[in-house]
């Protein structure tokens, strides 16, 4: 199942995030230099491994999507391209997860500001340490969704629409912001009542909800960016999807923060609100209300029938183009690796790749069904190319 594949792909990304959140801070207490050296060495090893295995990679033969005859028809009739997937549609779909990612971008920003005035757990675990909960949540809910939820739906021939996935992820993001508003009220109430701070672990549900939302929003966006994009734009579509996950939401959040800057000041006009006394005079709750409105808007947009049907039509066009055209499937060269060269020699140069064998057989069977006109003006449906019979010895 491709849905489970992209969920697990996103889980693997977060395995590195969990390891980094645990190992790097511990090493940094002893040596900052060693802490920065560890990721550099690991990235260098991955590059070396990637280059070292290049001799085993399957090269792709450049393919034209249309033949010369088809190009002439396409120039004369623009309707031929109507059912083709295009990058602009995929880009618009990726933009639908921006509201959720605005909520997601609050983990290292506004959540930290709020957590700075909360009491550390056991005097050690502070707000910056809670970011690991988000990655753990991705691993936990990703395992449940990819192992049980999606297979359960598949056994009943149920395909959860992409619009519903985006809406569900955004709803979980909205729930995280709503819980932050609850925590904000608890901070002010406790300080007004006793002058004390509440425990920082009250923020944990927000990180858990954000992590669960990532499974339905971000992993689905990865899936759509690759599967619904044209063959020659897949890498660009995936790059644009990353821009919608990190770039655009961060820029919008920065602009929003600048617009709402006054809410992060105390009564004296100072932006230094890291002490509970100054924080109690700020109006950070107003900022969370604005965030909640943005994410709820994302939920409503993705639930609209026209939006959901349009996403489904884009995915259907991509699926039809992939299954209906051999040109959309990259053909690996049979002699691109040492192993394939040996196989080619052993088989007298005949094609050995299973995929291309299947495609050749499909073409052979299609040719067999084409009617052939003979000199006697008879119309017969038989094989276009009859295999030559060897003469008897």
Image (tube, rainbow, N blue to C red):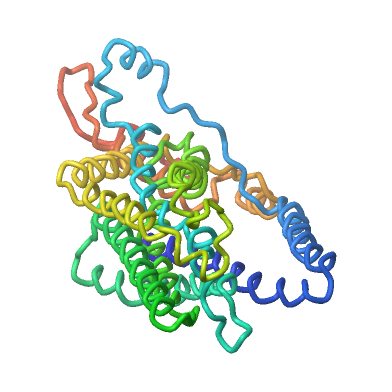
Picture quarter containing residue 360? top left
Q: Which residue shows up at 52% across the image and 54% down it?
A: 268
Does residue 330 appear in the picture of this structure? no
Coordinates of residue 17 in the picture (x, y in percent): 59, 67
Q: Which residue shows up at 50% across the image and 31% down it?
A: 63
Q: Which residue shows up at 59% across the image and 70% down it?
A: 128
Rendered view: 277 above or below 119:
above
Picture quarter containing residue 383? top left
Q: Quadrant of the N terminus?
A: bottom left
Question: Residue farthest to the bottom?
Answer: 122
Coordinates of residue 98 in the picture (x, y in percent): 39, 47
Picture quarter containing residue 190? bottom left
Q: Which residue shows up at 36% across the image and 53% down it?
A: 291
Residue 210 relative to residue 150: left or right: right
Coordinates of residue 344 in the picture (x, y in percent): 63, 48
Residue 233 relative to residue 177: left or right: right
């Amino acid at each position: 199942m491709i849905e489970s594949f992209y969920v697990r792909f996103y889980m693997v990304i977060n395995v590195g995030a969990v390891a980094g959140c645990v190992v790097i801070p511990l090493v940094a207490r002893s040596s900052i230099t060693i802490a920065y050296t560890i990721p550099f060495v690991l990235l260098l090893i991955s590059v070396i491994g990637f280059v070292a295995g290049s001799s085993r990679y399957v090269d792709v033969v450049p393919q034209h999507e249309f033949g010369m005859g088809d190009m002439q028809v396409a120039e004369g009739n623009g309707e031929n391209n109507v059912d083709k997937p295009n990058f602009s549609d995929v880009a618009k779909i990726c933009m639908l997860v921006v509201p959720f990612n605005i909520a997601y971008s609050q983990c290292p920003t506004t959540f930290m500001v709020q957590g700075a005035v909360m009491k550390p757990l056991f005097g050690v675990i502070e707000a910056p340490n809670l970011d690991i909960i988000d990655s753990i949540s991705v691993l936990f809910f990703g395992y449940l969704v990819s192992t049980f939820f999606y297979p359960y739906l598949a056994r009943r021939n149920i395909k959860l629409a992409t619009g519903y996935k985006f809406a569900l992820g955004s709803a979980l993001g909205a729930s995280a912001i709503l819980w932050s508003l609850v925590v904000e009220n608890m901070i002010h109430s406790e300080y007004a009542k006793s002058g004390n701070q509440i425990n920082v672990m009250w923020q944990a549900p927000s990180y858990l909800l954000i992590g669960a939302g990532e499974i339905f929003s971000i992993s689905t966006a990865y899936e759509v960016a690759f599967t619904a994009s044209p063959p020659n734009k897949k890498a660009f579509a995936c790059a644009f999807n990353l821009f919608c996950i990190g770039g655009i939401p961060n820029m919008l959040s920065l602009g929003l923060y600048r617009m709402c800057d006054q809410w992060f000041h105390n009564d004296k006009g100072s932006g230094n609100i890291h002490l509970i006394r100054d924080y109690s005079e700020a109006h950070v709750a107003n900022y969370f209300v604005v965030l909640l409105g943005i994410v709820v808007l994302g939920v409503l947009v993705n639930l609209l029938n026209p939006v959901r049907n349009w996403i489904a039509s884009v995915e259907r066009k991509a699926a039809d183009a992939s299954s209906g055209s051999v040109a959309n499937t990259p053909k690996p060269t049979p002699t691109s690796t040492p192993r394939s060269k040996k196989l080619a020699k052993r088989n007298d140069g005949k094609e050995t790749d299973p995929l291309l064998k299947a495609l050749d057989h499909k073409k052979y069977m299609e040719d067999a069904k084409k009617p052939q006109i003979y000199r006697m003006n008879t119309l017969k449906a038989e094989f276009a190319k009859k295999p030559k019979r060897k003469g008897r010895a």
